[in-house]
């Protein structure tokens, strides 16, 4: 486990180095001057304005993938940890990508003769409907509740690790595992907190990035924030769903096996515990698939920030999306 921690800390250091280098390059680059006018902004100006937003999202996703592969390779070597490092890999990778996103600097805004400032304060939740933030928060709370429930019902194995579920009465006793318990549950709760915190930092970075200076790009400025918010929310929600699904599958299988082996006087599996465990185990892969689909949508949106933003602005006014409808 210590080697895995060293690898993750090294990755965090890489985030700081990359972001510091990006800030230095951004500060050394002279600010361009763009003319402000009453007509529509040029296509080249709009493309330049959207380029950094897309590159920042793509760099973060690429870093998360590289970090996942590095942590996966390292976690396989830890045979004595019964899969714990492997369970933490996805969450740490997603957190690392979101941290890189939040630490990369904003581009130096081009100089213009007119200022573009909004009188409405921007918050991390300003660029999406409220439900798009409430859903991942509810998933995180339910997931932590599931981990606490499995911890309270867990039993120690022969090495004292709380990763088994044990059923017993006066005449029968059986145990099954691996079961989330405290052994897996406490680290997974910490990863959930890290994932939520890094997502909040990324959303704050989106809201705090200076506005595009050309007043003609005000709608474009709003649109890239909406799409970037959608990317961050979908990435965080997908990771949470994947973790919830994997935990549900693990817990449900252990409960079902323990209930099936707990044969009371030859009457078959212990009910309704067996049915509950089977249902939870079946729900696990469904949640994993849903999480993977959301992560795919996040990556797809990140690859198309420029084209999606300009395409949305090209729609007729009555069809153009508003900030309240983005991020769903």
Image (cartoon, rainbow, N blue to C red):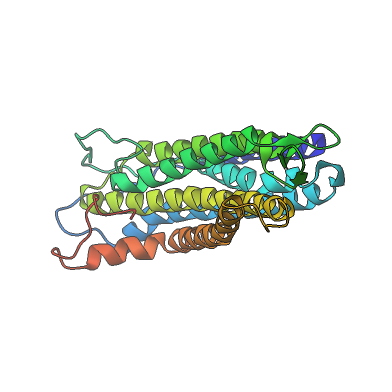
Residue 73 is left or right of residue 48, and the answer is: right
Residue 69 in sight in this render? yes
Residue 167 in the image: state x and y as whole percent.
71, 42
Q: How many marks?
A: 0
Residue 117 in the image: state x and y as whole percent.
23, 37
Task: Classify residue 122 by image quadrant.
Answer: top left
**Rendered position, 55 above or below 99:** below
Residue 188 in the image: state x and y as whole percent.
63, 39
Task: Classify residue 169 by image quadrant.
Answer: top right
* Of 241 and 43, the residue lying toward us: 241
**Rendered position, 255 above or below 201:** below
**Rendered position, 132 above or below 306:** above
Q: Quadrant of the N terminus?
A: top right
The residue most toward the front is 265
Task: Classify residue 151 by image quadrant.
Answer: top right
Q: Residue at x 46, y 45 (%)?
A: 139
Residue 272 is left or right of residue 8, and the answer is: left
Residue 74 in the image: state x and y as whole percent.
80, 48
Residue 93 is left or right of residue 33, and the answer is: right
Residue 127 in sight in this render? no
């Amino acid at each position: 486990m210590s080697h895995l921690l060293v690898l993750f800390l090294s990755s965090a250091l890489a985030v700081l180095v990359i972001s510091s280098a990006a800030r230095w390059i951004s500060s050394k680059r002279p600010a361009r001057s763009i003319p402000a006018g009453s007509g529509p902004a040029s296509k080249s100006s709009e493309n330049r304005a959207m380029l950094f937003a897309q590159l920042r999202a793509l760099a973060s996703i690429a870093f998360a993938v590289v970090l996942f592969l590095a942590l996966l390779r390292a976690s396989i070597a830890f045979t004595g940890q019964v899969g714990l490092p492997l369970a933490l890999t996805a969450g740490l990778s997603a957190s690392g990508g979101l941290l890189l996103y939040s630490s990369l600097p904003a581009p130096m805004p081009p100089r213009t003769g007119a200022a573009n400032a909004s009188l409405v304060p921007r918050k991390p939740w300003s660029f999406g409907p409220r439900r798009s933030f409430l859903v991942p928060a509810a998933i995180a709370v339910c997931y932590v509740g599931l981990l606490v429930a499995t911890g309270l019902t867990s039993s120690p194995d022969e090495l004292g690790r709380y990763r088994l579920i044990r059923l017993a009465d006066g005449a029968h006793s059986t145990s099954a595992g691996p079961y989330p318990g405290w052994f897996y549950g406490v680290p997974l709760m910490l990863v959930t907190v890290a994932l939520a915190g890094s997502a909040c930092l990324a959303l704050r970075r989106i809201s705090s990035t200076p506005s595009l200076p050309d007043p003609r790009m005000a709608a474009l400025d709003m649109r890239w924030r909406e799409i970037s918010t959608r990317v961050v929310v979908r990435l965080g929600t997908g990771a949470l769903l994947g973790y919830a699904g994997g935990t549900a599958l693990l817990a449900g299988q252990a409960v079902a096996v323990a209930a099936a082996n707990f044969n009371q006087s030859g009457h078959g599996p212990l009910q309704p515990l067996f049915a509950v465990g089977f249902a939870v185990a079946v729900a696990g892969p469904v949640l994993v698939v849903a999480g993977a689909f959301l992560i795919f949508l996040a990556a797809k949106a990140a690859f198309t920030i420029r084209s999606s933003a300009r395409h949305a602005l090209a729609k007729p006014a009555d069809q153009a999306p508003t900030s309240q409808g983005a991020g769903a």
